[in-house]
Image (cartoon, rainbow, N blue to C red):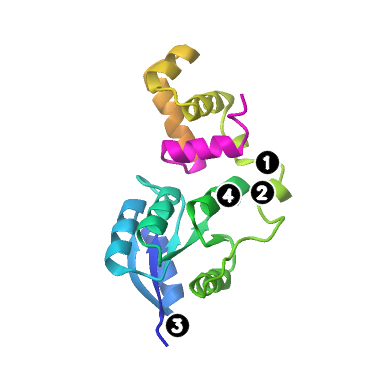
Amino acid sequence: MKPIRVLIADDHALVRSGLRALLVAQADFEVVGEAEDGAVALERCRKLEPDVVVMDLTMPGRGGINATEDIRHECPCTKVVVLTMHDDEAYLSMARLAGAAGYVFKRSLATELIQAVRAVHAGRTYFPSAGTTSRNKNPKSALAIISEREREVLTLIAHGYTTSEIADKLHIGEKTVETHRAHISEKLGLRTRAELVRFALDHGLLKD
């Protein structure tokens, strides 16, 4: 029986090392490569053709959501299991829309990741059961961790305004807008405009 060939995508070397040790300890797993960001993950997928990618969402450059979309489009035989600290339902929705086959919290037991990889490799999906994401069990949404001004900037970004247009509308400098955007990205783990738009949609910021 062929082992399940896994690629690990996470921007922290220590996390990748720990995941590698966990996975190679399983007789039916083989770690074929690692990637420190989404762009490298896609490049390695093209070259190595892994069965499963264990994908972090929050990475510099091309983040996990866009990388998942890229991989599902260009490497359709490769399944993606998201492994993330984000337990808000909005992130789960984004991962599903991007084509992820599984979603596991980093706070979960190690055995859960192993189960998820085996499940998606077998053609099934592996997602948290109802009530385990923060929208269901915790009234504090991911939106609550950004300031009111950051929320205004995020809403305008999602509506398609440029940095200079946002600066004019809010009567602040362009560098201030860029600083707010950097803080939003850091707090929410969203790097691209597409990810920010999805987040805004999921949190009702584009109703008007």
Sort mark 2 into few (<14), some (14-19) or many (20+) by Cα contacts within 10 Å. some
Q: Which residues are magenta?
A: 188-208
Residue 75, x across and y down, in percent: 36, 62
| Residue assigned mark 3 | 28
Instruction: Tell me the quadrant of the picture where the N terminus can be found.
Output: bottom left
Question: Residue, x 37% and y 46% (percent of image)?
Answer: 60
Q: In this rendering, which labeled residue sits more in front, label 1 or label 4?
A: 4
| Residue assigned mark 2 | 134
Q: Label 4's element?
A: helix
Q: In the rendered image, which quarter is residue 162 located in?
A: top left
**How much space separates mark 2 and mark 4, taking CA atoms?**
12 Å
Dot 2 and dot 1 residues touching (CB under 8 Å): yes
**How much space separates mark 1 and mark 4, taking CA atoms?**
17 Å
Q: Is residue 10 visible?
A: no
Sort mark 3 into few (<14), some (14-19) or many (20+) by Cα contacts within 10 Å. few
Q: In the rendered image, which quarter is residue 126 located in?
A: bottom right
Residue 183, x across and y down, in percent: 46, 33
Q: Which mark is residue 140?
A: 1
Q: Label 1's element?
A: loop
Q: In this rendering, which labeled residue sits more in front, label 2 or label 4?
A: 4
Q: Which mark is residue 7?
A: none
Q: Which mark is residue 93?
A: 4
